[in-house]
Image (cartoon, rainbow, N blue to C red):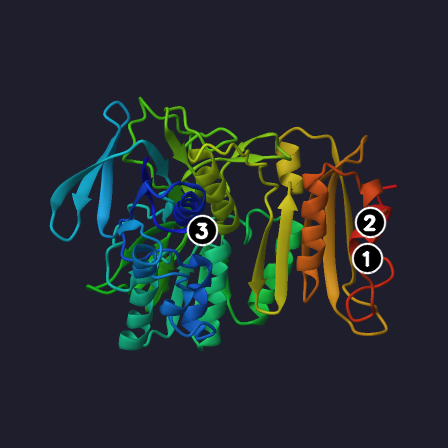
Amino acid sequence: MRYVIIGGDAAGMSAAMQIKREGTQDDHIVTIEKGDYYSYGQCGLPYVISGDVSSTDDVIAKPVEEFRQKHGIDARTRHEVTAVDPNAKTVSGIHLDTNEPFEIEYDKLLIATGVSPVLPNWDGIDLDGIHSMKTIPDTDQIMTDLQAHQPETVTIVGGGFIGLEIAENMREIGKHVRLIQAGSQLMNPLDYDMAELLHDEAKKHGIELIFNEFVQRFEGNDRVEKVITDQGEYSTDQAIVNIGVKPNTTFLNTDVFNLNDQGAIIIDDYMQTNVAHVYAAGDCAVDFNRVKQQNDFVPLGTTANKQGMIAGLNMTDQPKAFQGIVGTSILKFFDLDVARTGLSEKEAESLGFDYAVSQIKTNAVAGYYDKQPLHLKLVYEKDSRRLLGGQAVGTTGADKRIDVLATALYHNMTTVELLDLDLAYAPPYNGVWDPVQQAAKKTL
């Protein structure tokens, strides 16, 4: 069997290793990667800035040579795929080092091409000193720029996960950080009342926040000197743009492959596309959201690894369905842990749920043992009390609570049933009534 996998990171290599485990000795696996690196932890890259992660080399889980020599995978780098022909069952493209075309035949194909940063066509976007962060080369360029030019002021455009992590790590090395956000809050997946806690934390650590302004262009002589918005201009020595991502699917013929409005590949529970013998997994594909009961686009490494493993099983004729997501994520932002799962209040409203909210400020551990404030919010259906989502922000304990809520969402539990959970208690970790259950009590 000839297996071809486009994409050498989380989903692609999870699938490749699953095929190696479950396939036969006669199988031939070709993996095609546009870049130079395989299988690395992109989420660790912002921490290279501060030195919490000492080098981009440290985030590489397995070097490409290990896949080739130890596992016998035909792992190719610097190969950019430009077309898939389902009729001929071929993948074609360009070898970026030689500019020579290539064509590979497949029996089964997996598309796991991930996402790329959205970079608007702003005037001056190509000036020296303007970056985005998604890959190892992106991060290496930022680190080289920091060392060569010693910027004092760094302007970050975009207040999502990556933007906030970069902001924190830039402050850790003493930079003046300005963060420009087109909307009225940081971390759009949070409700505003929870996001305000992040705003306070940012200001506490000296980050300059600019809300409700839209970047128009950058100015400078060869190197960026100013960021111009619709309301003002700001001097800067470096700029990092991370305003979102888009699926790497432009090489696919949309008359053949079904994509959603964001360009993500539509797949079924078995990672199968609408094209026979072609599968998709990871950030370039949709995720079924169990709470929304519809396809979603939530590109996260956890989901990519799961979908890749499941794709590998299905490609080797061992049917396994992906059970979907509930939309769980967590962020460290200075002294705060910021976590969410399921639907926010604003999402519940937009989807037409008849919902209610239970919100508390409590202590993450026994109050007599330590003072660790935790803000917790539950969103639930009014009549059934079915849990719809939760958000937690605090100095500790947000991770524990959000994982409980994510598990409850997976099993379609009600807030009443949360009270029956047997959760761990000892004064250094909890009070006798867990904050999740304290909030659940208020729904009765």
Residue 176 in sight here: no
Secondary element under disc 2, as helix, strand or loop, is loop
Gap between marks 3 and 1, in whole Å? 40 Å
Residue found at the far front of this picture: 25
Above or below for 324 versus 368: above
Q: Indicate left or right for 1 with 320 as reference.
A: left
Image location of residue 84, percent across then percent down: 26, 31
Q: Label 2, on which residue?
A: 421
Q: Quadrant of residue 376?
A: bottom right
Kindly report which numbered mark, 3 or 1, lies closer to the viewer in this rendering. Answer: 1
Secondary element under disc 1, as helix, strand or loop, is loop
Q: Residue at x 41, y 71 (%)?
A: 49
Q: Which of marks 3 and 2 precedes in the sequence?
A: 3
Q: Are marks 2 and 1 in contact (CB under 8 Å)?
A: yes
What's the amino acid at mark 3?
Glu
What's the amino acid at mark 1?
Asp
Q: Residue at x 38, y 61 (%)?
A: 62
Q: Which of marks 1 and 3 precedes in the sequence?
A: 3
Q: Label 3, on which residue?
A: 213
Image location of residue 284, percent across then percent down: 40, 40
Camera-side residue: 56 or 334? Answer: 56
Q: Label 1, on which residue?
A: 434
Q: Are marks 3 and 1 in contact (CB under 8 Å)?
A: no
